[in-house]
Image (cartoon, rainbow, N blue to C red):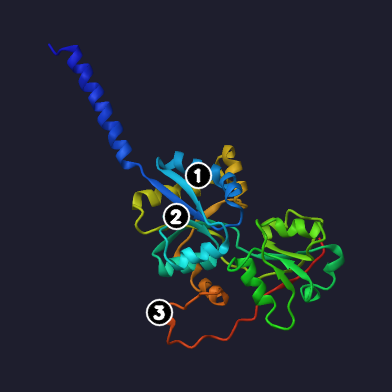
C-alpha cells in the first residue's frame, strides 16, 4: 500500500512544478504610448488597461512613456527597444516599416483633428486664425503636423504654442483667454459643446496597438484577443472610456501604409532607404471640413 505521506509529498511536488512552469512562461512587457499626458497622469490613464491585459494574458504589462514628444521621437529614431506600442497612424506606419512592429488592433474610429475656437472666433474659420494663437501638442505629434498641412504659407501663419502638457490643455487655455484656438483629436473636441470647430482635418486610420515581432506569437495573439473583447464587458467600461473609443477592431500594416509621409515635416526625419532615389511627390492638398455651428 502506498504511503500517504509519500503520496502527499508527490502531490505538493507536482503543484510546485506546475507553479514554476507557469512562472517561467510569464514575462514582463512594456507598452509605449505617446506623451499626451505628463508621466504621472499617464500612469493613471493607462493603469486600467495595463491591469486588464495582465489579468487577461497572464503576463505583466508596464507603461513606458517619454516626458515629451521630442524625447519620444528621438527614442523612435534611435530604435529604442519597445514591446508594444499604442500610437497614431504616422508612428504606426513608421515603426511597421522600420522597426518590425506588427499592428494588431486599432480603435474603430478614424483619427481626425478639430481646430476648436470660441464662438467669437468661429465665423472666420481656419483662415481667421492667421496671426492668432493656437495651442497644440509639440512636434511631431499628429495634431501639430496636421496644422502644417492647413497653414502652408510661411507668411500667413497663426502663432502656434506647442507646449501643451496634455491633450486638453489647449482647450483650457481658450477658456483662460491665453489661446484663440486648440488643435485636439475630434473625440476630445466632441466633449466641448460650448466651443466651435473652425475646421476638421482629413481622416487617418485610428490609433493602433502594435507588437514587436520578437514578442512570442502566443502573447501577441492573447493581447489581440483581449483587446477585441474589451468592449463586451460592462465592468471594463473605465478601461475603454479612458482610451476615447467604443471598441477595438483587427488591423494590419497595410491599413497604415503611406501614413509615415506625414512625418516628412518633422525635424530629423529621413526617408526610408528604398525611397531615397524616388522623387518626392508634390504636397497633397489637405482635406478640411469647414466649421458648422453645433
First-in-chain label (2 vs 3): 2
Q: Is residue 64 visible?
A: yes
Q: Percent x, y for residue 15? A: 28, 27
Q: Is residue 254 visible?
A: no
Q: Residues within 10 Å of mark 2 (few under 14, many from 20)?
A: many
The residue indicated by pointer 2 is 84
Comparing 4 with 98, the one in front is 98
Q: Residues within 10 Å of mark 3 (few under 14, many from 20)?
A: few
**264 up-or-down from 181: above or below:** below
The residue indicated by pointer 1 is 50
Q: Residue furthest right?
A: 120
**190 up-or-down from 98: above or below:** above
First-in-chain label (3 vs 1): 1
The residue indicated by pointer 3 is 273
Q: Residues within 10 Å of mark 1 (few under 14, many from 20)?
A: some
Q: Percent x, y for residue 131? A: 79, 76
SS of the residue at dot 1? helix
First-in-chain label (1 vs 2): 1
Residue 276 left/right relative to 12: right
**Do the residues bearing badges 2 and 3 touch, measured as CB atoms within 8 Å?**
no
Residue 151 left/right relative to 100: right
What is the quadrant of residue 203 in the picture? bottom right
Count numbered badges in the picture: 3
Residue 116 left/right relative to 53: right
Amino acid at each position: 500500500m502506498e504511503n500517504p505521506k509519500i503520496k502527499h509529498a508527490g502531490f505538493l511536488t507536482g503543484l510546485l512544478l506546475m507553479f514554476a512552469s507557469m512562472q517561467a512562461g510569464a514575462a514582463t512587457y512594456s507598452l509605449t504610448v505617446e506623451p499626451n499626458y505628463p508621466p504621472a497622469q499617464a500612469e493613471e490613464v493607462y493603469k486600467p488597461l495595463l491591469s486588464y491585459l495582465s489579468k487577461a494574458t497572464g503576463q505583466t504589462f508596464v507603461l513606458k512613456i517619454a516626458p515629451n514628444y521630442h524625447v519620444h521621437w528621438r527614442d523612435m529614431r534611435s530604435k529604442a527597444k519597445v514591446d508594444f506600442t499604442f500610437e497614431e497612424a504616422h508612428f504606426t506606419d513608421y515603426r511597421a516599416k522600420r522597426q518590425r512592429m506588427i499592428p494588431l488592433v486599432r480603435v474603430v474610429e478614424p483619427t481626425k483633428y478639430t481646430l476648436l475656437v470660441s464662438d467669437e472666433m468661429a465665423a472666420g474659420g481656419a483662415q481667421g486664425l492667421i496671426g492668432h494663437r493656437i495651442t497644440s501638442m509639440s512636434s511631431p505629434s499628429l495634431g501639430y503636423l496636421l496644422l502644417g498641412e492647413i497653414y502652408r504659407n510661411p507668411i500667413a501663419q497663426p502663432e502656434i504654442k506647442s507646449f501643451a502638457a496634455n491633450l486638453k490643455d489647449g482647450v483650457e487655455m481658450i477658456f483662460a483667454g491665453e489661446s484663440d484656438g486648440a488643435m485636439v483629436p475630434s473625440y476630445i473636441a466632441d466633449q466641448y459643446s460650448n466651443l466651435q470647430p473652425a475646421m476638421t482635418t482629413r481622416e487617418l486610420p485610428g490609433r493602433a496597438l502594435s507588437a514587436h515581432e520578437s514578442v512570442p506569437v502566443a502573447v501577441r495573439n492573447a493581447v489581440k484577443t483581449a483587446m477585441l473583447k474589451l468592449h463586451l464587458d460592462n465592468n471594463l467600461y473605465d478601461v475603454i472610456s479612458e482610451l476615447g473609443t467604443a471598441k477595438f477592431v483587427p488591423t494590419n500594416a497595410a491599413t497604415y501604409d503611406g501614413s509615415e509621409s506625414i512625418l516628412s515635416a518633422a525635424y530629423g526625419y529621413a526617408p526610408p532607404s528604398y525611397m531615397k532615389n524616388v522623387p518626392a511627390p508634390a504636397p497633397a492638398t489637405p482635406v478640411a471640413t469647414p466649421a458648422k455651428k453645433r
